[in-house]
Each structure stands twice: as structure tokens, then as C-alpha cells.
Image: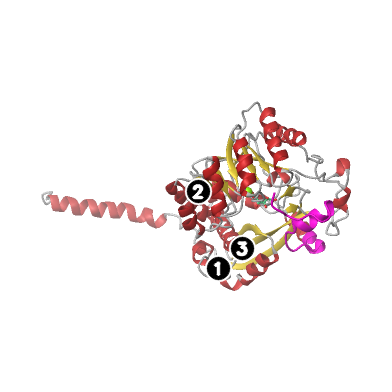
Amino acid sequence: MHAPLTRRRFAGLTAASLAGFALPAFAAAPKPAARDLRIKRLKVTPIALPDPPILAASGCHGPYFLRTIVELETDDGITGIGETQGDERVVQELEQCRKLVEGRSAFAYRSFAAPMRDLRTSVYAGIEMACLDAVGRATGRRVCELLGGPVREEVEFAAYLFYRYAADDPRVFADTHLVDRRGKGDQALDRWGEVRTPEAMAEMAWQFHQRWGFRVMKLKAGVLEPEVELRTLQLMNERFGGKAPLRIDPNGRWSVNTAIRIGRELDELPLEYYEDPVQGLRAMADVRHQTGLRLATNSCVTRWHHLLDALAVKPIDVLLADLYWFGGIAGVQSLGVAAENVGWGLSYHSNNHAGVTMAAMIHTGAITPQLTYAGDTHYVWLADGADIIQGSNLPIRGGKMKVPAAPGLGVQLDPDKLARAHETWRKSGMRRRDDATTMRRFEPGWKPTLL
Ligand code: GKR
Ligand code: MG
């Protein structure tokens, strides 16, 4: 005879049957792959990639821009890749990090930040990028998914418009750093020609719009006379029928008086923001106050600790984030929260970079909801096929870039292109950016005086 089914017995039976049923199934479940992603080897490869003679307040870009590729080989057979700045000191500091990261797990990337605190901020950023790429590859997840999931699958960028000399200007070929076989005419690095008048710039802006679909136009100023640059912006506005949001960035080369004088004229234009017309928090705050314009910076607030003074002096409305300055990909994500809480908009700063950084910027834009301004990117100036990633350069359509679909950052290094870029670095002898010296090839005696 069966014992009566009491509440207690029912509970016991249920637990036993559940256990009896579940245990064998649990035991049969496939064991998740145990991956430690222990870093076996840090590989640091300095590279030089071709750059056209574009102009800014610092002078003229040399024949190459410098970057460093970071590869982290793990004992699971997975290699994570990162890219960071290319100055000699960054390369040396990355080399010093070997003893810090080798033998550690790529999952523990946050623990590298404290011991790297006294190094250039871009050192941690490059290592973090490679760790996240390794973790993504190991887990089959995109970097944006590892950090909370994308709030957008496409990230918008602005047309980054520089006055410039032609890629095949004879003075480019006179540069002894030039070691590749770039030619003239059809064989030139690019076909934009010389752009040093308002008319030529308005035309180039239109061509950028036609080719890549950019909606927002950013003029790199601080190159020609301020009135000529104002005229350039006005002509661009006419060319776009008043429909394109505009930005102007003299890189701090204007005096406060010039910035206020030009700023009052800018009021007539669909200006999205006025970027670094002058140098320093107080001068920026002065221009902001006197013109009532929305000011932006990638110069007077470039580190976390600058935020304190900036909050007191109030120089800006929009901050340009840079993952090399603000603590890597996750650092920019946090910067978004900070910016939102202090009432600043967020945009992107960019120096020249290759496709690995481009991918990292897209992932970061995808996980930073506050990054609502179209970001800067120099990527358009990197000739197609000159990147070190496999395949063509990452595409820009409708002014936007899609988050790459593959795990990790979603881009692969092309070993041949990487070797070539390293060889160019070795032969060119360029070890740091020196726009002033290059500029003096074009304009002997040139100095970065205040305008
Ligand atoms: O690459 O010439 C350049 C830019 O001017 C760059 O150096 C700036 O850092 O792009 C940057 C900016 O927005 O000021
Ligand atoms: Mg700027």
C-alpha cells in the first residue's frame, strides 16, 4: 500500500524526481570551452601609412602618418589586435608593457590600467583594444556586445575637410622621407588636387557629400586668412542650399578678437559648433560668452582630470571624445555618461588612423548613446587599399559606418600589407609627427603664428 501523499512527501518526491531527471541531463551538457586567453606574446609593430599634404594650424602633413599595431597572441591560439598612436615614445612604452601583460589573461584588461597610469594614455588604449578583440573572438561576440550591446548599428561621421596641396605637388617628391613609388596624375596618391580657395573647398565638400553621403561638413581652419576661411564656410553653405550643418575648427590659431569677430558672422550660418577657435579654457569661455555660439573642443579638455576646471570655467558645450585620451573604448563609454550629466554633447576627435582604430571607433560609437554628433574621422584620407586590414577600406555610406559583423573588432590584419607598412616606417625614418618642417617645404619660413 502506498503511504498517503502528504505535502512534505510531495515536495520530497518532486525534488527527487527533478534531480533524478535533471542530473543526467546536466552531466551530459557540453562543457563550455575553458579559455583563459592567457597572453603568450605581445607584438608591437610600428607602421607608416601614406598621407596626402593636408593643412592645419600645425603645418602640413608629411608623406606618412605613424601608427602602432598591437597583437596579443594567447595560448588558446587566438590573437587580438589593436592600433594606437605611432610616436616613438608610444612604441617604446608599449615594448615596456611586455612584462606586464605576458602571462596574464586578456579577460583582465581592466587590471592593466593602474600599472600603465604613468605611460601615455594611448598605450593602455591600444592594449585594451587588443584584449577586447581577443575576448570577442574567443566568445564569438562583437566588441560592442561585450560592453553592453549596441544602441545603434550604424555610426555617423562628418566630412573632415582640409585645405591642401595636390598629392603630386613636386614639393612632396622632394621630401627625403618619401620611400614609396607614388606617382603623378593617375598614379598620384589621390586626385583631389590643390584646394586652397573657398571655391575649391566648396567643390570638394560637395564631392565628399556625393561620394560618401556625408551630411555634416567640418572645415579644418587656422590655415588661410580667417576672412577667407569664413568665406569658404559661406560658399559651402550656398553649395548645400543652407541644408548642411557646418563646423569650423581653427585648432586654436585665432586670437580671441579674431574668434569673436568671425564668430559673429558665423551666427548667420547653420553652424553646428565652433571648435577650438582659441587656446585655453578661459579664452574659449570668453569667446563662448561673447558670441553665444556652441563651442566644442578636442584641445582644452583632453583628459579626465581636465573636467574639473572645465566645469568651473564653462568653455564648451560639446566635447570631442578620443579613445586614446579618455581610457580606451570603455573610457569613452563612461565619458558619455559624464558628458550627459554635465550637459555637454559628445562628438569624436580623430587624428590619422588605420582600419583597426576605425572599427574600434564604430564599436565605441555604437555603445555610447550620448555620442549623437557625427564624429570626425581622417579615414577618408587613407587611400583605398593602403589600409593594413584585409580587403578594401571599411565602407562609408550615407555618411555612416556599420558596426562590423564578425566577432571582436570585426577586422583582420593583412600580413603582407602590415609588413609593407612596417618596412615603410623603417625606411622613411619618420618617428614623430612634424607638420611645421613639412610646411616649410611649401612655404619657407612658415611659423604657426596667431591670426
Ligand atoms: O590631423 O591636422 C590634423 C588635425 O588638425 C588634428 O591634428 C587635430 O588633432 O583633427 C584634430 C582636430 O580636430 O583638432
Ligand atoms: Mg579639433
Q: SS at mark 2?
A: helix
Mark 2 near mark 3, Cβ–Cβ under 8 Å?
Answer: no
- Residue at 34% x, 56% y is 23
Mark 1 near mark 3, Cβ–Cβ under 8 Å?
Answer: no
| Spatial separation of the CA atoms under disc 2 and disc 1 | 26 Å
Q: Name the residue under label 1.
A: 116
In the image, residue 184 sits, relative to residue 176, either above or below, namely above
Please tell me whether residue 436 belongs to the stretch shown in magenta: yes
Residue 355 is situated, as x and y percent measured from the top left of the image, at: 67, 50
Amino acid type, mark 2: Glu
Query: Considering depth in this image, is 234 or 149 the residue closer to the camera?
Result: 234
Q: SS at mark 3?
A: strand
* Residue 374 figure quarter: top right
Query: Considering depth in this image, is 365 or 52 the residue closer to the camera?
Result: 52
Q: Which portion, as a residue range, is magenta?
A: 423-451
Residue 368 is situated, as x and y percent measured from the top left of the image, at: 50, 46
Residue 29 is situated, as x and y percent measured from the top left of the image, at: 42, 54
Q: First in sequence: mark 2 or mark 1?
A: 1
In the image, residue 206 sits, relative to residue 115, either above or below, namely above
Q: Name the residue under label 2.
A: 145
Residue 100 is situated, as x and y percent measured from the top left of the image, at: 56, 71
Amino acid type, mark 1: Met
- From the viewer's perspective, tell me whether residue 430 is left or right of residue 329: right
Foreground tag (1 vs 3): 1
| Spatial separation of the CA atoms under disc 2 and disc 3 | 20 Å
Q: Name the residue under label 3.
A: 72
